[in-house]
Amino acid sequence: MAHPELCRRPCIYFAAGSCANGSACGYCHLSHEHRPSHLDRRHRDMLSNLSETECLALLLPVLRCRAESTGLAAEAVEVLALLEDKTVACAATSAASRAPASRAATAAKLPQHQLSKLSAVLRKMNFSTVLGMALRGATGCENKHEEDLAAMGGSLDQLLLGAVDRMRVRVAPQAVGA
């Protein structure tokens, strides 16, 4: 689906010529020109030291840029809007629970040049990889509008996962002969 931006990692069994799952395989069977970009340990540590709000605030612009540059902007509108809502909800929750002094300490935790380097590495990754990081970083944040979301069909995390599935369906190639 939407190779290479939304596909999963390459199937190691297909590459070796022995994938028994065929079209039911959850991994990508198309060739990938470049080895997928990954965060090194230093970048993973930096990302894990960020609060949920800071993580989402870092990843959301990267996702927007990646969606626009790869032609997925229209398909990603719902996902990006939900991630923006999650960022705002997390920011409101963390602002209410932290003292001003601890907020300043958190902001000073990572120098701007390190965040810039991390952002540059993230921009080299495909949309699906960065989205996965955002989804993992977006879990567990309390939302004060949980009742409204339940009426809409579930928690924000559930809505996000549903939006990602709908986005993948919209960009999936149409069935042959359909």
Image (tube, rainbow, N blue to C red):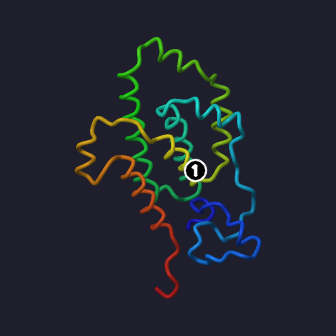
x and y, in percent, of residue 17 in the image: 75, 76
Q: Is residue 78 left or right of residue 28?
A: left
Task: Give the SS element for disc 1.
Answer: helix
Q: Position of residue 174 (x, y in %)?
A: 49, 77
Q: In which quarter of the view is residue 166 placed?
A: bottom left
Residue at image location 56% in from the left, 60% down from the top: 6
Amino acid type assigned to the residue bearing label 1 in the image? Arg
Establish if 86 lies above or below 70. Answer: above
Q: Would you name the residue on which mark 1 appears? A: 66
Give the residue furthest to the bottom: 177
Rendered residue at 46%/67% (across/down): 169
Residue 21: x and y in percent read 61, 76
Task: Identify the residue at horizontal 74%, vertical 70% (top origin).
Answer: 15
Q: In this orientation, which residue lies closer to the viewer: 81 or 149?
A: 149
Image quarter of the N terminus: bottom right
Q: Nearer the viewer, residue 109 or 171?
A: 109
Q: Is residue 58 above or below residue 156?
A: above
- Front in this rendered view, residue 16 or 65: 16
